Amino acid sequence: MSDLPFKGRVALVTGASRGIGRAVALGLAKAGAHVVITARSLSQLESLDDEIQAAGGQATLLQLDLRKGERIDQLGPTLYQRWEKLDILVGNAGVLGPLSPLGHTTEEGFLGTIDINLNANWRLIRTLDPLLKRSDAGRAIFVTSGASSGKYAYWGAYAASKAGLEALVKSWAEELANTDVRANLINPGATRTQMRAKAFPGEDHATLPAPDELVGLFLELASPQCQRNGAIVNYRDWRDPGHSKTASNATNSSTADL
């Protein structure tokens, strides 16, 4: 690990037990950051910690259920006691929720999706905003989806949660304009994750980008040099500036940005 651009920086990643969150947490650790990895599964966090240590990185494990708001609220004071700041926040954790007609969606299914994908991120912002402002270059990155457009039938709960998240983060970014903190969103598009497999079980997932292919974009937005603020960055557009959402080698055009 000779090149450590994030040495001395503290990062927190939610949903770090698998998929994109796991890949990003490992990428940040390999780049020198001390990564606070959070998820509900302690065993999967321990597995990631082993991988981080094997790569020469450092992590702190924090078992966290984002459905428990009071636990999220304790994050700011807890991190302050140890580090007095936070340099990077990656709000990655999310749930797919029910894929069904809105008239058939249960209250539990709808509100549960909103609670994890939107409300939990608002709580993260509220408790960690002061710590990010104590950094010389606080960076916050959240994960959205093309479903936020509302143009896909049966995705109502998920779409509403991601549209709300986009509005929330963009509003916060405006509040941060005169500070050293920057907040942005990434739309990964179709990616080889368990959530994608659940949503599209008949898809050939081997053709999709692996989570670790997205790490470079997360590191770019997490860098102190990044001055983007309030942006939604589509991974495929970042990877290939000539990419069109109307065509994809990985999947058909109707689901390319989901």
Image: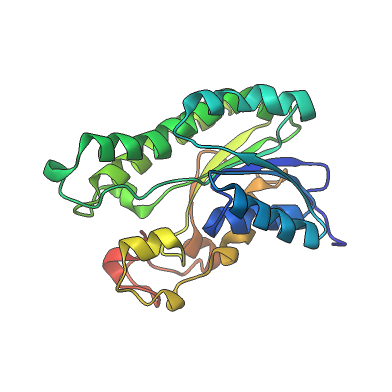
Q: Quadrant of the C terminus?
A: bottom left
Q: Number of callouts in the render? A: 0
In the displayed structure image, the side of residue 244 where residue 13 appears, left or right: right
Relative to 177, say whether 3 is above or below. below
Give the residue at x 38% y 33%.
Answer: 115
Task: Please provide percent x and percent y for residue 2.
Answer: 88, 62
Q: In the image, residue 41 lies at what x, y percent?
A: 55, 48
**Figure quadrant of residue 211:** bottom right
Residue at 26% over, 36% down: 108
Position above or below: 202 against 145: below
**Residue 107, image quadrant:** top left
Residue lying furthest right: 2
Residue occupying image coordinates x 47% and y 69%: 242
Side (left or right) of 167 relative to 63: left
Q: Position of residue 124 (x, y in %)?
A: 54, 30
> Residue 139, how many percent across, how many down?
64, 39
